[in-house]
Image (cartoon, rainbow, N blue to C red):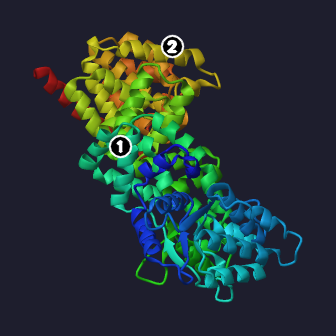
Amino acid sequence: MSTLLYNPDRKSKEQLLSEFVVRTQVYEEIMHDLETSKMKYPEQHYLLVGQRGAGKTTLLHRLKYGIEDSPKLKDKLIPVIFNEEQYNISELANLWESVGQFLEDYYGFEGIYNQIEKNIDKKNFEELSYDIIEKYLHKHSKKIILLIDNVGDILKKLDKSEVHRLREVLQTKKEIRLIAGSPFYLETILDYQQPLFEFFKVIRLDGLNEQETQNLLLKLGELHNEKDKIDKIINEMPERIETLRTLTGGVPRTIALMYRIFTDHNDESTVKDLERILDSVTPLYKHRMDDLPVQQQKIVDAVAKKWDAISVKELKEKVRIDSKNISAQLRQLEKNQVIEKRETGTKNHLYLLRERFFNIWYLMRYGRKDDKQRVIWLVRFLESWCNSEDINSMILNYIDKINCGKLDIDAINFYGNIYAAFTNIDPEVRLMFKCSVPGPLAANIIVSDKELIKGIKKYLKEENWDKILELAINVSTLDYDLEKIIYLSISALISKITKSNFYKILKSKIESYEKNRGNEEVNAVLSEGELAVFKNIFFHHYNFKLFSGKTEELFQEFTNYLDLIDEKRLQEKSFDYYMLTQFFCLILAKTLYNLLYKIFEEITSPPLKEIFKPVYYACVYLTEGNNSLEFLRAGPEIQGPIQNILEVVKRLESQIAFKGKS
């Protein structure tokens, strides 16, 4: 059914009959009326109203075949069907010419067309043409039923007198009946001053209900040899059918277009299929926009770009049309199934596009071109379309392809930006996702403190130090609490480091940093987040050496560590400041006073002695006492901070002594 979506008339009779599984109730209602009508008098005419893709054309062709096959109708009623576009009809006489030509070509009314054309130069050509058709119908004991799609296109071309004349024919002639289709309510039948006001019996082709959607999917499954797959979805995941119906507004053509994604959407091929589908529906949706009056186009544009439901007050600010006029246009758009109204219990209702897939198409085609907007329509589609399990599966598949080298950097970034915008990702999958993508992309993947702690605890329990390292490397935030978590996790990592590739990765990162130090493109090697992490890693690396007694090696490498520190952050007493303060306190607790003196005296950039003045004077106090000349240089304003440092050192000494005993 997904083939020949825009041209049902090109399908064979057998194919169309086989695939006609929706709009069956409307079909049976009209057929019952036709079969029970004697047509001794002029009969009621029908107007099928439904947005493009709703099934009007298919229904008209089904009625044609139904009339031809009906024992009650086939001998007396001729269905004359017109294509959606009738470029040759610009006046009412052209309509009768086309009918005559059809009757001659397909029903043996020989000579009828020539009889009509003989009068082409006469002033009353239209009346004479219809009279000839009526004469031939009487001769063959037949009546005709006109099946005209997009009848509004024809009516627009006729002048008012011709529309009055058409109404007269349809009201007074028993030989002819009209069933017409239109994507919207016609002004000529809504305005009481117009000749066709309330002339038709209007049947609105609303979106398919749940059962109709299911029937259509079963037929599509049969046509694609995937009936078992559809049966499984119906039995095990019925909510997915309702999601499809909501997303498409129940429009049959859109449902058929989206069938492939509906049955298979667990990797990036979903996105490719979606882009292809969005491209293929452009004629359908562009027609839908072109059908609207200018003011309605402007309103639909504003509603579409908002995505979420919008009020009349908000619309007024965006489109600069008075509220009364906006409300009137919204009522018309609602009647034509373009807009859906959300009742609020007040006079201030909310409005959004009825067919969400149409909204997605509009965002893709006319939304802003910045990076976020470029993928937001995909994100909104996938979040509407896929459940949490689907999204997690999609991301895991993406991660696997990255690890196997199956995606280039453009594909990694494109799909990564889409997946990073999801909100319903399993915390563990989110952590894996963050650990698998490049630094700049990882920065867009927000992992909460709770999720990060959960992931770290999981990896600590598994003693999966490589994973802890991957997680640490890819964390991009400099939030104090998150750095503290990483600080603690790396402490555990260091204690188990012997069988890990920690040193290999660390050495590679250090070498890359050293090679590019001073280079303006250093961020291409180490992101700000990576630098923060590696400052922590360096700290624990030196801390490890400190407790191993390798003080000389520690001092030699300490300058490399300081190269990673922004002096401004130290001056502002950031996490770097408190981390180094704790490290210096550990040195004092280990009574390695000479090492600390050496650090303060020989490292002058950044000026550690000045920045960490309380620590320096705490060291002086511990080595020379509080009456020494050097200690007395300390100003009164830092006496409190010095005392705090001494208390920390004392507490650390107790911890070290306790560990030594245990």
Please provide percent x and percent y for residue 429: 33, 36
Mark 1 or mark 2, whichever is nearer to me: 1
Secondary element at tag 2: helix
Please provide percent x and percent y for residue 137: 63, 71
Q: Is residue 91 left or right of residue 151?
A: right
Please provide percent x and percent y for residue 440: 52, 33
Residue 635 appears in view:
no
Please determine whether, in this image, residue 506 is positioned above or below residue 183.
above
Q: Which residue is mark 2?
A: 511
Please determine whether, in this image, residue 191 is positioned above or below residue 309.
below
Residue 413 appears in view:
yes
Please determine whether, in this image, residue 574 is positioned above or below residue 290.
above
Please provide percent x and percent y for residue 327: 58, 80
On residue 425, which mark appears?
1
Secondary element at tag 1: loop
Assess disc 2: are there few (<14), some (14-19) or many (≥20) residues with their C-alpha within 10 Å of its C-alpha: few
Q: Amino acid at mark 1?
A: Ile
Q: Is residue 456 left or right of residue 275?
A: left
Name the residue located 32 percent from the left edge and 21 percent from the top edge: 466
Front residue of this view, candidates 332 and 650: 332
Quadrant where the C terminus sits is top left
On residue 655, which mark appears?
none
Q: Amino acid at mark 2?
A: Glu
Count of labels shown?
Answer: 2
